[in-house]
Image (cartoon, rainbow, N blue to C red):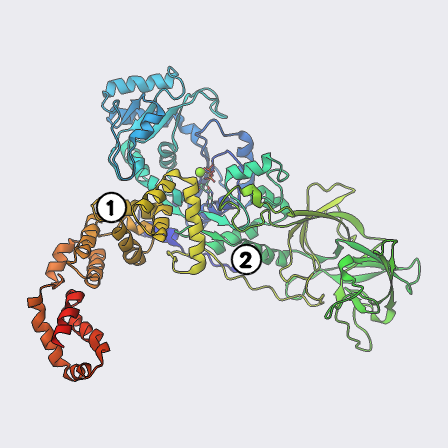
């Protein structure tokens, strides 16, 4: 499957297609911009595959750019590991390797340029004061007393900052934008801060460092990036991104596009948490095969092809969601099934003596490397002798019904070998089985009997005289729960059994310099760990076989390639109606609130405003929705009513959060419409029509209502003739009603509402009808 996964179109490709069709660019330029402050993980791999993949599919290039603007947390060790990982994933940045720190001088010059334009100023207030002055979502910010310092003075001060005349925290450079902007990020954001710190590349050249929002867009512009793809958290930063680009007067204008970050079940992805796992020795380093780091996945034996296939399968979307790790495992198996030759390894050996096999004799049996459904050929010779090892779990003294492996008196087939029958189990003093005595049927060499005798079970084995001892590391999921960082301390959810080690025996065709990924028959896929030495082989289990061999009966036939689990992947649209999606999105919202204090504050504030729990959860947990909600609230309608209209009426009509910021309907119009309903001037049904009109073509709701005659008719005088007409038109129903079938009242109400185009006040209609009937 890996080869023929179609590169699915997605909203990013659509944007690129449009830009190319409009002649905006001849070729595209994307970038992968890691901060060298940790190892890359599978989430980064998604971004790498996306950015480098686009540059491969379109005429274009992808830059590897180290976003090293924070001197404190960064390190050259990480730079090298990141390069390794990107290369290993199969991507090549060619000449396009960049470091943000190389642009420090140019960025600084542009900062002076902004100051000279009167668009930036040096602020000497303490950080707390600046933070407090930012205001809240419902209150505008307060202007800094330094906001109107003269250009000359600001220039002098900025130069002093650069010259090191101030200590850390004594001054910052801020953009002069708008302290009342509904987007808090636009309220005079910081551009530079002072940090007397050594940088891993620029040494002590600088003591001021640019902030992300200032630096990142300039890096993109300097490099001629056309499409700057980032994760959804940066949606609100886009306005600032565009502002900096515009006001700096840089010639090139990159476009920021946001997509949903990858989260996987049963693991954590935050760099901070991964670091904690390493530092506190919960795992054995960054490349522990249980880690979701690329280094870990690589050591475990997962191939770059499997990771790329996974990235293609999950696609890109605009809504965050958590991908089931079993989908990743499916991609891994699918890839390994095609590439891993089958060999035999006994993980938990139990010795079998074949008592009727001549002592001292050995022979070689031919064994295929490939099952029938893999278009490859090849075989090797497997030595066989009087003593072999089988899996301890392949013997049962008291076999349950349906157990077709070894048991007293039972006959099984040895894979590629003979039929053997268990005669006797040798036990130690404690009653543990330590050895089996079996007999073999010499007529069954190669696995068939001349008399067509049926044996149901086939087991794997390794010759005791020829097998090579090896250490086997069996990995399980690192966490015991699906969402370890959903609540509480994620470390509490570590799976204590995520690693178990056994001493096995492997057939001698596999040796110490063998770097192949293998399927150990009936056990899973395995890869040699770098801990292996010349004398001691160590294998990592990459992934188990899908069909749970251990539980089911041993079989000779290979199972057909498994079907993919229904991909629980992100979709392009908001699928909040779908249950599983809904669950994972509510989890995302909890997470967002846990990570972002202003969202947590929203939850509290919204609850106080009287919103239902569901509405408060939705609007506080998803930033774009909350921002929109607050923008509508600013026009003065009751919060609870606004929330109900937003959640129940508007959101189902707009595609995604992104669309909220570019509706034809203004927030003021939406608010007015809500007011019309609340004041009983327009019925809910009529308001829905107005909403549709507003979304389609904008405009003023009051005008639309009047133009279309949608104002509620709550004047009895106006209603009376309509009602009389309805009764006249439905004379036989009136008869039936008067004979006692009063349940017909609803019918008359409906007819009247219809006759008024939904504009009548339903309560009044009901009363008038009752009176006339
Ligand atoms: P932080 O910024 O907190 O250190 P980060 O995970 O964002 O962590 P970066 O080095 O900034 O790390 O990320 C590099 C790129 O990888 C960014 O463009 C980011 O959007 C992308 N990225 C990071 N995590 C994921 C993820 N889980 N899924 C998809 N893309 C991701
Ligand atoms: Mg980041």
Q: Quadrant of ligand 2?
A: top left
Q: CA distance from mark 1 to mark 2?
A: 50 Å
User: In this view of the protein, which residue sits in the foreground, 697 or 187?
Assistant: 187
Q: Position of residue 279 (x, y in %)?
A: 59, 34
Q: Position of residue 60 (x, y in %)?
A: 41, 45
Quadrant in which residue 362 is drawn:
bottom right
Q: Which residue is mark 2?
A: 2
User: In this view of the protein, which residue sits in the foreground, 772 or 142?
Assistant: 772
Q: Is residue 118 above or below residue 579?
A: above
Q: Is residue 723 above or below residue 248?
A: below
The residue most toward the top is 165
Task: Give the residue at x 56% y 41%.
Answer: 491
Task: Give the residue at x 20% y 56%.
Answer: 694
Quarter of the N terminus within the rendering? bottom right
Callouts 1 and 2 close, C-beta under 8 Å: no
Count residues near mark 1 (Cα–Cα under 10 Å), then give few for <14, some for 14-19, many for 20+: many
User: In this view of the protein, which residue sits in the foreground, 154 or 574?
Assistant: 574
Q: Is residue 184 above or below residue 546?
A: above
Sequence-wise first label, 1 or 2: 2
Q: Which residue is mark 1?
A: 633
Q: Position of residue 88 (x, y in %)?
A: 57, 43
The answer to whether residue 88 of the structure is visible from this angle is: no
Quarter of the C terminus within the rendering? bottom left
624 left or right of 389 in image: left
């Amino acid at each position: 499957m890996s080869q023929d996964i179609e590169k699915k179109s997605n909203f990013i490709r659509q944007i690129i297609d449009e830009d190319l069709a409009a002649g905006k660019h001849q070729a595209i330029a994307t970038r992968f911009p890691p901060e060298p402050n940790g190892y890359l993980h599978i989430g980064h791999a998604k971004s790498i595959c996306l950015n480098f993949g686009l540059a491969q599919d379109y005429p274009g290039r992808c830059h590897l750019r180290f976003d090293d603007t924070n001197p404190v947390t960064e390190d050259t060790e990480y730079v090298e590991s990141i390069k390794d990982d990107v290369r290993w994933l199969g991507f090549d940045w060619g000449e396009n390797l960049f470091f943000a720190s190389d642009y420090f001088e140019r960025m600084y010059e542009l900062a002076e340029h902004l100051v000279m334009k009167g668009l930036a100023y040096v602020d000497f207030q303490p950080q707390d004061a600046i933070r407090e002055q930012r205001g809240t979502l419902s209150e505008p910010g307060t202007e800094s007393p330094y906001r109107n310092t003269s250009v000359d003075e600001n220039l002098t001060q900025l130069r002093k900052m650069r010259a090191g005349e101030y200590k850390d925290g004594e001054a910052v450079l801020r953009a002069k934008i708008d302290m009342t902007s509904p987007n808090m990020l636009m309220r005079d954001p910081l551009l530079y801060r002072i940090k007397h710190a050594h940088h891993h590349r620029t040494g002590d050249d600088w003591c001021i460092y640019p902030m992300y929002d200032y630096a990142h867009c300039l890096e993109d512009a300097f490099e001629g990036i056309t499409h700057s793809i980032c994760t959804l958290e940066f949606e609100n930063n886009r306005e600032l991104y565009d502002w900096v680009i515009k006001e700096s007067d840089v010639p090139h204008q990159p476009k920021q596009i946001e997509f949903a970050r990858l989260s996987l079940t049963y693991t954590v992805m935050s760099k901070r948490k991964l670091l904690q796992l390493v530092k506190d020795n919960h795992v054995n380093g960054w490349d522990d095969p249980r880690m979701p780091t690329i280094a870990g996945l690589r050591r475990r034996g997962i191939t770059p092809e499997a990771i790329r296939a996974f990235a293609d399968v999950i696609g890109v979307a605009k809504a965050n969601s958590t991908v089931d790790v079993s989908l990743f495992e499916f991609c891994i198996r699918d890839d390994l099934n095609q590439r891993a030759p089958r060999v035999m390894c006994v993980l938990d050996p139990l010795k079998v003596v074949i008592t009727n096999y001549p002592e001292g004799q050995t022979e070689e049996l031919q064994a295929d490397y490939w099952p029938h459904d893999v278009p490859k050929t090849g075989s090797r010779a497997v030595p066989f002798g009087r003593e072999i090892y089988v899996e301890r779990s392949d013997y049962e003294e008291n076999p349950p019904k349906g157990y077709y492996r070894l048991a007293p008196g039972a006959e099984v087939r040895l894979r590629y070998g003979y039929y053997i029958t268990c005669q006797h189990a040798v036990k130690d003093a404690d009653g543990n089985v330590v050895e089996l005595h079996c007999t073999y049927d010499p007529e069954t060499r190669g696995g068939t009997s001349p008399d067509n005798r049926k044996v149901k079970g086939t087991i794997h084995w390794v010759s005791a005289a020829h097998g090579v001892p090896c250490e086997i590391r069996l990995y399980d999921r690192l966490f015991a729960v699906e969402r370890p960082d959903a609540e509480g301390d994620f470390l509490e959810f570590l799976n204590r059994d995520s690693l178990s080690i056994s001493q096995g025996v492997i057939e001698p065709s596999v040796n110490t310099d063998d770097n192949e990924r293998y399927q150990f028959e009936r056990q899973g896929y395995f890869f040699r760990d770098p801990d292996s030495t010349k004398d001691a082989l160590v294998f990592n289990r990459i992934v188990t076989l899908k069909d749970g061999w251990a539980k089911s009966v041993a079989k000779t036939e290979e199972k057909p390639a498994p079907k993919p689990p229904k991909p629980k992947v992100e979709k392009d649209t908001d699928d909040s109606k779908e249950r599983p999606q809904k669950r994972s999105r509510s989890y995302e919202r909890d997470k967002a609130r846990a990570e972002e204090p202003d969202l947590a504050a929203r939850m509290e504030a919204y609850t106080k405003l009287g919103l239902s729990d569901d509405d408060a959860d939705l609007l506080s947990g998803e930033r774009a929705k909350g921002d929109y909600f607050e923008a509508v609230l600013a026009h003065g309608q009751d919060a609870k009513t606004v929330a109900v209209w937003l959640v129940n009426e508007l959101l189902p009509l707009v595609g995604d959060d992104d669309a909220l910021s570019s509706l034809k309907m203004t927030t003021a119009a939406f608010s007015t419409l809500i007011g019309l309903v609340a004041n009983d001037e327009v019925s809910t049904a009529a308001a829905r029509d107005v909403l549709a009109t507003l979304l389609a073509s904008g405009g003023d709701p009051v005008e639309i209502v009047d133009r279309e005659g949608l104002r509620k008719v709550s004047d009895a005088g106006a209603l009376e003739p309509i009602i009389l007409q309805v009764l006249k038109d439905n004379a036989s129903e009136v008869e039936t009603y008067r004979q006692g079938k009063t349940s017909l009242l609803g019918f008359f109400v409906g007819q009247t509402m219809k006759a008024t185009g939904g504009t009548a006040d339903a309560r009044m209609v009901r009363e008038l009808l009752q009176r006339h009937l």
